[in-house]
Structures are given as C-alpha cells and as structure tokens.
Image (tube, helix red, strand yellow):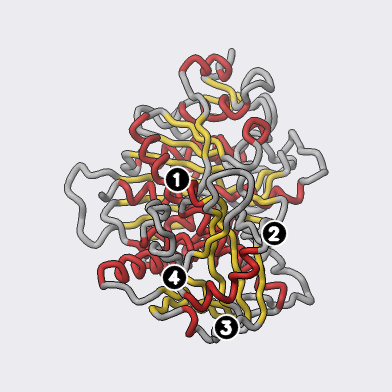
Amino acid sequence: MHTQLLFQDATASTTPLLAVFAVDISTSKDAAVPALLTTSDAISKAAERFLRDGEFKASANETLLLHAPAALKAERLLIVGLGAAKSLSVDEIRRAAGTAVRFAKPRGIRSLSIAFPEDRALSDERLENLPCDATARALVEGAELADFDADTYHSDRKDRSIQELAVVAKSQEKTTSDEIRKGFDEGLIVAGAQNFTRSLVNEPGNVLTPTELGKRAAAMCAENGLQCEVFSTDKLHELKMGAFWAVAKGSAEPPALIVMRYEPKTAPPAGSPVIGLVGKGITFDTGGISIKPADGMEKMKYDMAGAGAMIGAMQAIAQLKPAVRVLAIVCSAENMPSATAYKPGDVVTAMSGKTIEIINTDAEGRLVLADGLYYARQLGATHLINAATLTGACVVALGTLNAGLFSNDEETVAKFAAAAKGAGEKFWRLPCTDDYREFIKNPIADIQNTGGSRWGGAITAAMFLKEFVGETPWIHLDIAGAAWLEEQKAWMAKGPSGVAVRSIVEWVRSFAS
C-alpha cells in the first residue's frame, strides 16, 4: 500500500472514498449527538441530514456511507464513529482508521483518503487527549494493519489490497505539521514491523522451520543494518544450553539460535542500559511426548509469535534509531514426539547450571526461554523482556483481550505500562512473588518445568522463567490469548495479531529518553 500525507482541504481530495471521523458529544444516555471531526462546511452539509435523523449514532467503529456527496470531489463519503467524545483516545483513532480500510477492501475500493481529525472541530476541549503526533501515528498504524489478510495460500486468491491511501490534513503552522509528519512516519515504521511479524506467524510449520525463521530474521537484519548471527546445534552444545536442546532434539529439523544486535549511531555512555529481547520461537508444537489433543493443533504454528514479535520489534528499532543498545535472542525449535525426543521424568541441565525435571514435555517454551534469558544476561543485557505464547492457563485467566504481564521490578513495569498505554495494547499484571516458588520445587532436581497442579499455571510458568533472570529487571509477556484473533474485527482481519510489537518498541525507546 502506498501511503502518503497530504496537507490540503479534504473537500479537494479526488478519491473513490473519503473517510471522516465522528464522535458522540451527548451528555446523557437518552440520545446520541453525532459531531464530525472536521471544520469543513461542505462535508458537514453533505452529512447533516443523516446525522440529524438519528440513523447514525457515532458509536465506536459504526459506519455510514454516502454516495456522490455534494460539493466534494470524493465519489463516496464514509463516516466512521469513534464513540463518546468524553472518553476519546488515540486508540479509537487507530481502530477507526482500520475500520475505514476494512470497509473499503471487500467493496473493491482500492484507493481512499482519511481526513485527519481537527482539534478545532468541537467548540470545547474534547480533543485535548489527541496530540497531533500520536494521532497521526495511530491513524497510520490502524490503516496499515487493517490491510493485512491471512489468505496467503489460497490458490485462487483475489488481491483486495488497498493500493493507495492518503491521510489528508488541513494546512497547519509548521510546528503542528512537523508533529503530524513525525507521527505519520513513525506509524508507517511500526505498522510495517507489526505486519512483518504477522506474516511470520501466519506461515505454516512446513514452510517456516527454525532454519527458515533464521534466514528471514537474517534477511531483515541485513536490510535494516542490524548485526545478526544464526547458530544451530553445535552452538547449543558449546553453550551447554541443555534446556533448549532437550526440546529441539526430538525433531528432524535443526534448531536455530538467532542473535540480533542494534547499536545506536552515537555510542551511549558507559553504564547505559542494554535492553535484551528474548522470544519463544517454537515453529510447531505438538506437545512432544505429552502430545496435545488433535483438535486445534493446526494453530500451533503460531507458537513462535513471541519470537515474531521480537524480530518485528527489532525491525522497527533499526528504523526508529533510538539512542539505546538492544540485543534480541530467539530460541527456535520444533517440539516433536520421536525416538529422540525428551521424555517426562528426564532431568536436563540449563545453561545456567540449574537442573530441571521434565514433568510435561508440552511445557517446552519455558525451557528454550530459560537458556535464552540466561544467554542474554551473559551478552550484557541490563534489562530483559521476553514474549511467548506460553500457557493456556493465561488464556483461561484473562481471555483474549489482555495478555499476561509478570515482572520482578516495579520501575520496569511502570515504564512498560506507560509504553503499552501509548501503543494501545492491553496487558494485565499477574503475581510473580517468591511464595509461588514452592510450586516448582522438585525432589530430585533444582526445579521442575510445571507446577504441582493445574492451578495458577501461568504464574508457575513465570516463576520458572524468573529462576534464570537473577536480579536483572525483567518482564515476561504471556501472549497466548492475544497473538491470534479467532474472529474478524471491524478494524483487523482474523488471524495473527502481531501483539506486543508496538509496546516493546515504545518500552525500548523509553530507555533512550
């Protein structure tokens, strides 16, 4: 999709479809009062009768299409609701922009314009929560993310992609226009990275093997000026990554240990933070010897979504160029049942030297992450974050709207919470306190890879990872419920979501400020 920013009157936009946002400014629950976020008299007049008659209430992602609007050069006028003005945030802008794109795609509309919401459109200060740069970024992100569809392998695939998108903003004073341009450019970068992650997660396991994931990560790094090394079995043995190797050895496909590095143009002062990103890259998960039920197993290609998020985040970081060192480690393998697979009852030794009794081979993600987190510390990471589709227990606890968040450091959590809020992603913190360690104690090894019962499974998994981070400030994101959309949304297609990319990028950037 070719996306451009134009500073002009939206009424002069010659386009098959012009999208304009609207809010409900009512102060009671009795009746909606829709108001357009544009100062254009021509647009307001074209929509006036339809807004007045109560047909359109400006509820979130509600749409109203008008054909041949008078006094406009656009062939169609699409009004997209943002919901109540009193609770408006940039996240509603992101979703509404996506809704406009998803509205156009099945109707064969290949080009559209979206009018940038004007802060002078309402008589009071209702838009004070929409700074220009954040609004522009959210708008572009929503539109770009909405153009992604997961139907890559349809033999009769009809390309419904949007070919051209224009964000149309009224001419502004230079300071404001610079802010809009900055947000626009950042939105393109971050959305592109998130869509890259989604494309990786969408690939079937027979295509995206650990080796192939390594190749694609290396290609991305080469394109964006990142350092990248991809290792396999010999390196795991050299580093004594016994936990990672235990998972990998059941598959005919060799594992991949992917190490990516970003160095800012100007070297940060000595003692500056080094941010370590660690991703679970299980390109297909059968559960191993503790095999999963057949129902739904095909979705287990998405078990590398944490790795995908880290690879996508590194792409965005390379392009945004924050003044902070970042390294990323992806531990990728298949978890397969075979004569060489690890077994329940086995005892393996992690890179840290800690011994682990295997209770369930379907708790494999925490094993590869254990060695990945420890290795990141050895490479100099001062702050750690990992992402993984780690536990079904987290989905039971939080559903699909929030991903799980665990940490050992309050300051680090506060930074991440601020980043996630700005990114429009939802995470819910769950406990990770030392009293839960009791559940992973083991009589014959240092720890075991599951809790002693089914209760608190997401927490015991986090406690397992905590064993390998020491005193390093650390965040664990359990994205099992949010990494794959089971239903199409008005603003996004069913399939891989690319969750956590935006939040991780903003969290990393917070260390450069």
Q: Position of residue 488 (x, y in %)?
A: 70, 56
Q: Position of residue 464 (x, y in %)?
A: 52, 27
Mark closer to the observer (2, 1):
1
Using the image, tell me which numbered label, if any, was put on residue 229. none
Q: Amino acid at mark 3?
A: Ala
**Which image quarter holds the N terminus?**
bottom right
Contact between marks 2 and 1 (CB within 8 A): the answer is: no
Residue 309, visible in the rendered structure:
no
Q: Position of residue 470 (x, y in %)?
A: 38, 28
Give the quarter of the image for residue 442: top right
Separation (CA) of disc 2 from disc 4: 48 Å
Label 3: which secondary element: loop
Where 52 sits versus 477, above or below?
Answer: below
Give the quarter of the image for residue 153: bottom right
| Front position in the image: 110 or 46 | 46
In the image, is 463 to the left or to the right of 266?
A: right
Q: Amino acid at mark 2?
A: Pro
Earlier sequence position, callout 2 versus callout 4:
4
Separation (CA) of disc 2 from disc 3: 41 Å
Mark closer to the observer (4, 3):
4
Q: Which residue is mark 4?
A: 39
Q: Local crowd at mark 4 within 10 Å, few (<14), some, or many (≥20)? A: some
Using the image, tell me which numbered label, if any, was put on residue 420. 1
Mark closer to the observer (1, 4):
4
Q: Which residue is mark 2?
A: 204
Label 2: which secondary element: loop
